[in-house]
Structure formats: structure tokens, C-alpha cells
Amino acid sequence: MPPLDRWRVDAMLEPERKIWGLNQIAEVLGVSVNTARTWAQLPNVPIYKPSGSGSYFAFRSELLAWLRRKT
């Protein structure tokens, strides 16, 4: 079994926690708000903006999984 690190603990404690807003999403990803906004436009990045809504959101577990695959 792999060692228990920060990512695994977060996934176990709050697997489907929604993160609201680009500021919070950028903080989780460790990037600027502008970078998060740019990434949100890419089809494979799990950042969502419902039609007619000005707000972005993401599921913490999806973001962390995507980030692990990206690095």
C-alpha cells in the first residue's frame, strides 16, 4: 500500500467536496487565477461553468486526480 500523503488524506476525508470560484480552484491547483481560467477553457480539465452562470466550480477529487495525471 502506498504511503499516506496529503493527496490521499484529502481524497479519503472529502472525496466529493465542491470547490466554488476560480480563486479557490486556483488555490487548490497552486496556480494563479488567470491560469485556472485558461485551464478551465480546455476540454480535459475538470473545471465546470454551468450555462448562464458566472460561477466556476470543481470537485476536489477530480481536480487532484487530474493534477496527478498532469505531472
Image (tube, rainbow, N blue to C red):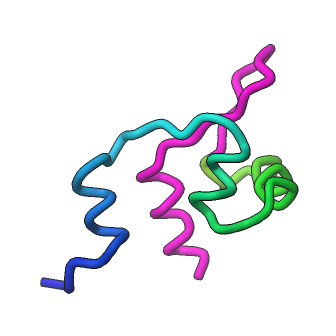
Question: Is 51 in the magenta?
Answer: yes
Please determine whether, in this image, residue 35 is positioned above or below residue 52: below
Q: Left of 1 or right of it: where is 28?
A: right
In which image quadrant can residue 32 be found?
Answer: bottom right
- Residue depicted at x 36% and y 69%: 7
Q: Residue furthest left?
A: 1
Give the residue displayed 63% in from the left and 58% down from the top: 27
- The magenta segment: 47-71
Quarter of the image where one finds residue 5: bottom left
**Looking at the image, is 19 positioned above or below residue 44?**
above
Q: Which residue appears at 69% of the width and 56% of the height?
A: 26
Is 34 on the left-hand or right-hand side of 31? right
| Residue 69 image offset from top left, x and y in percent | 52, 74
The image position of residue 2, as x and y in percent, is 20, 85
Left/right placement of residue 5 relative to residue 69 reads: left
Task: Tell how many labels.
Answer: 0
